[in-house]
Image (cartoon, grey):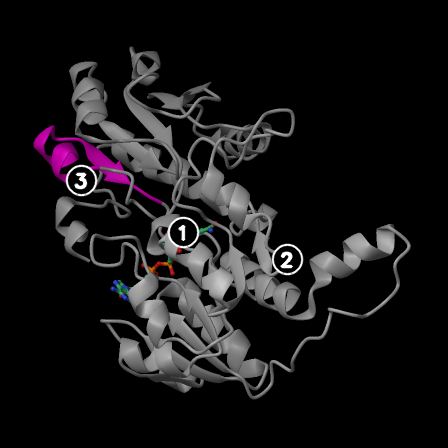
């Protein structure tokens, strides 16, 4: 199997190389994202291996198929960037890594909550400047707060367990409730009730047409004044323009973003010598109560190892003509 591996950084190569040792697939590492501009690079390969910001729309899939590419191996759980109908139409197999470490993402989510509340990012900067004052750093006890978890799949469940451990009252919303969540200390409620009663709202649902801009001016109008919103799921779950307005009005008191709707050309790159052209992101970066990380929640060595091993396993099953246990078909688009 010859695989063109897009969006690869040195750390991806390190883990993929180790996982490929036994399989010995021919991997071509490409730093660029897969888009309609770079799809040409996939000429001569049987499969492409891609990540969260690669673009696999109908046009790219058609062009991949015309080159004989039969496999799309995602190195992530989310598949919102793949046109699954187009892949089906062209008889292409799409596989993903459904679970590589829910703990990595859940723990980063909680790190964001703690940092925002106790203003660790501001305290760190201050102390480096020799400013040891506490003014403006006042936080609150997490114990006793109400935390709303939207989406209680693998990551959401771990967040429920951690927040219940802090002594929070945990509300949950998911169209497919899981009894385990109630056992962990969460209570399922309607989405409106979660929005109205939560002091902290954290997003762990996939990006679908239904969840796009789940947090916007309308839903924020139901939230408590000063609510904390954390999004480590997918950027487009939030309407960033509405969120800026809600930060200005004080409706949002704290915002933690590990993902951003327009992150594709920005996150994972060192742009420190360039002019940032995204005015909304630039505005978000000015608020003292906004903490942004660059799609980093998954980034633990445990997760990278699991991603690499499952990806190689997925490719090996495909190469052996066996049914792909981690396949995603177009029927999944409905979820
Ligand atoms: P999962 O599939 O296990 O869980 C998703 C849950 O969302 C499911 O229980 C599903 O029923 C629920 N859901 C579906 N539609 C919903 C809706 N309209 N409202 C509320 N809930 C809904 O997925 P997971 O592994 O827990 O991952 C969750 C998301 O986290 C992924 O979709 C991905 O976008 C994101 N993610 C981000 C990172 C990162 O590094 N920031 C890493 C991994 C995953």
Provide the residue span drawn in magenta: 83-96
Image-quadrant location for residue 151: bottom left
Q: Which residue: 17% across, 50% down? A: 333
Location of residue 248 with respect to 96 vertically, above or below: below
Query: As drawn, is 229 to the left or to the right of 195?
Result: right
Mark 1 close to ligand 1, CB under 8 Å: no
Q: Which residue occupies the extreme left position in the image?
A: 89
| Element on which disc 1 rests | helix
Residue 84: mark in rendering: 3
Location of residue 30 with respect to 72 vertically, above or below: above
Mark 3 close to ligand 1, CB under 8 Å: no
Query: As drawn, is 140 to the left or to the right of 244?
Result: right
Q: Which residue occupies the extreme right position in the image?
A: 130
Is residue 88 part of the magenta span, yes or no? yes
Is residue 200 part of the magenta span, yes or no? no
| Element on which disc 3 rests | helix
Q: Which residue is mark 1?
A: 240
Q: Quadrant of ligand 1?
A: bottom left
Q: Is residue 151 visible?
A: no
Location of residue 112 with respect to 180 vertically, above or below: above
Quadrant containing the C terminus is bottom left
Q: Which residue: 57% across, 27% down? A: 275
Q: Which residue is mark 2?
A: 288
Few, some or many C-alpha atoms within 10 Å of disc 3 (few <14, some 14-19, many ≥20)?
many
């Amino acid at each position: 199997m010859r695989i063109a591996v897009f969006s690869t950084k040195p750390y991806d190569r390190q883990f993929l190389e180790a996982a490929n040792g036994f399989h010995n697939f021919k991997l071509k590492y490409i730093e660029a994202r897969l888009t309609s501009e770079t799809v040409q690079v996939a000429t001569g390969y049987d499969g492409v291996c891609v990540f969260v910001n690669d673009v696999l729309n109908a046009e790219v899939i058609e062009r991949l198929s015309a080159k004989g590419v039969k496999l799309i191996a995602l190195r992530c759980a989310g598949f919102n960037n793949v046109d699954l109908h187009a892949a089906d139409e062209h008889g292409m197999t799409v596989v993903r890594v459904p679970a590589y470490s829910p703990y990595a993402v859940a723990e980063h989510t909680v790190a964001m909550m703690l940092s925002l509340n106790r203003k660790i990012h501001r305290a760190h900067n201050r102390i480096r400047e020799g400013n040891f004052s506490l003014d403006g750093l006042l936080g609150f006890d997490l114990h006793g707060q109400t935390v709303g978890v939207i989406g209680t799949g693998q990551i959401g469940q771990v967040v429920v367990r951690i927040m219940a451990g802090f002594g929070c009252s945990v509300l949950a919303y998911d169209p497919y409730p899981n009894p385990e969540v109630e056992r962990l200390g969460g209570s399922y409620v309607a989405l409106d009730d979660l929005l109205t009663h939560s002091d902290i709202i954290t997003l762990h649902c996939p990006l679908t047409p239904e969840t796009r801009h789940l947090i916007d001016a309308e839903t924020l109008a139901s939230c408590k004044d000063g609510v904390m919103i954390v999004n480590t799921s997918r950027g487009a779950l939030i309407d960033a323009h509405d969120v800026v307005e809600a930060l200005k009005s004080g409706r949002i008191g704290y915002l933690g973003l590990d993902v951003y709707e327009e992150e594709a050309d920005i996150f994972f790159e060192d742009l420190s010598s360039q002019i940032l052209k995204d005015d909304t992101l630039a505005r978000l970066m000015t608020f003292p109560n906004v903490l942004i990380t660059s799609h980093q929640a998954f980034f633990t060595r445990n997760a990278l190892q699991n991603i690499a091993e499952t990806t190689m396993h997925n490719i090996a099953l495909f190469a052996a003509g066996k049914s792909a246990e981690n396949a995603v078909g177009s029927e999944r688009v409905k979820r």
